[in-house]
Amino acid sequence: MKAARLYAPDDLRIEDVPKPEPGPGDVLVQIELALTDGTDLKTFRRGHPVLLRESPSPFGHEFCGLVDGRRVVAANSAPCGVCDGCARGEQCRDLQFLSGAYADWIVVPERIAAVNLHDVPHGLAPEVAALLEPLACCLRGIDRAGVQAGDSVAVLGAGPIGLMLAACVADAGGWPVLVGGREERRELAGAFGAEPGDGRGADIVLEAAGTEQAWCDAVELVRPGGAVVLFGGLPGDARPALDAFRLHYEELTVRGSFHHTPATVRAALAFLASGAYPWEQLVTHRVSLAELPGLFADPPRDLLKAAVVP
Ligand SMILES: [Zn+2]
């Protein structure tokens, strides 16, 4: 079969590889399409401490596919169920991940298939169903933020994640304000329940840009006594210079939000199927597997997400 494999930053190749063999409990899925995301683009540009540990590495983790004629979608990980984090109802400390969605076939390992592989509801387009994983991360972010009806919530970062976070805030009864981003992205804000703005004095700030500057900006923007949720990951050696005065004297709450849980994955699938927001507008491009290296090397300016069709 054909598969994209990442050898090193800027070195992504489409190659013939053996079709993967499922073990007991694993599920072999024929990929209908996969979606590009910002993490993949970052990994392509500068590598990744977890995703690019071996070379070559399978690549891609958002997908929709077929199993015996049934359309299915899966998240890219599952919790272990036995670690300290799982026992406390917190994020698992030993998540098992899958990768390799830019390919004809993928094996969903038993642990992930058991909790995070779902049939796609009838009528839901594959490119919308494949938004499951990032939307599940956003719903966890909203949980971590404790968004209540009437809260003003600034979202830093106007990419696909920022737009999905805005929709989640609006759905929870909050008032999302989309901060930053280029003009054409800000124009999409309204369709996802948000208004563009500067976010100053918000009750809650969701940082979804994934830069040290955005982490610092989030702490500067929130109102005294407000909450900041750090959603965008930074390199492991990053030490952002957060405003200690504000943290202490203004009693800010700062929390991290990482990844998703089986509960937010299920909620995300229902949210997508509800058709409450024009999710399909987040998928702006469609490319073949052969065109994928070129897309990553020179992403179109108006790219939000691309559907990669094997
Ligand atoms: Zn665990």
Image (cartoon, rainbow, N blue to C red):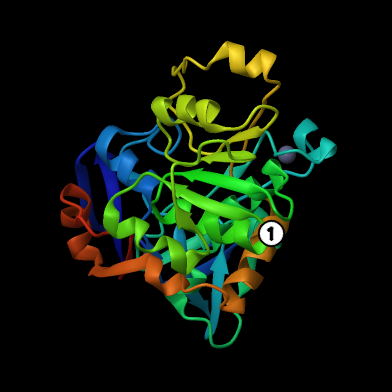
Furthest residue to the right?
87
Q: Split into 4 quadrants, where in the image is the C terminus?
A: bottom left
In this rendered view, identify the residue nearer to me: 46 or 174: 174
Q: Split into 4 quadrants, where in the image is the N terminus?
A: bottom left
Q: Can residue 268 be seen in this view?
A: yes
Q: Quadrant of residue 108?
A: bottom right
Task: Give x and y (percent) for residue 202.
Answer: 59, 40
Task: Give x and y (percent) for residue 266.
Answer: 68, 64
Query: Which residue was labeled with disc 1?
Result: 172
Q: Does the residue labelled 1 lie within 8 Å of ligand 1?
A: no
Q: What's the residue at 15%, 55% (across, down)? A: 294
Per the image, label 1 sits on a secondary structure element best described as loop
Instruction: Tell whether 107 sits left or right of 87.
Output: left
Q: In this view, does 96 lie above or below 167?
A: above
Q: Can residue 68 be seen in this view?
A: no
Q: What residue type is labelled 1?
A: Ala
In this rendered view, identify the residue nearer to me: 67 or 262: 262
Q: What's the residue at 66%, 36% (across, down)? A: 94
Q: How many marks?
A: 1
Mark 1, other Cα within 10 Å: few <14 / some 14–19 / many ≥20: some
Task: Give x and y (percent) for residue 270.
Answer: 65, 72
Q: Is residue 208 above or below residue 261?
A: above
Instruction: Tell whether 220 sits left or right of 246.
Output: left
Q: In which quarter of the image is residue 293?
A: bottom left
Task: Give x and y (percent) for residue 51.
Answer: 42, 39
Q: What's the residue at 66%, 34% (across, down)? A: 227
Q: What's the residue at 65%, 63% (across, down)? A: 171
In this rendered view, identify the residue nearer to me: 56 or 44: 44
Q: In this view, does 247 lie above or below 130?
A: above
In this rendered view, identify the residue nearer to me: 241 or 173: 173
Specify the quarter for ligand 1.
top right
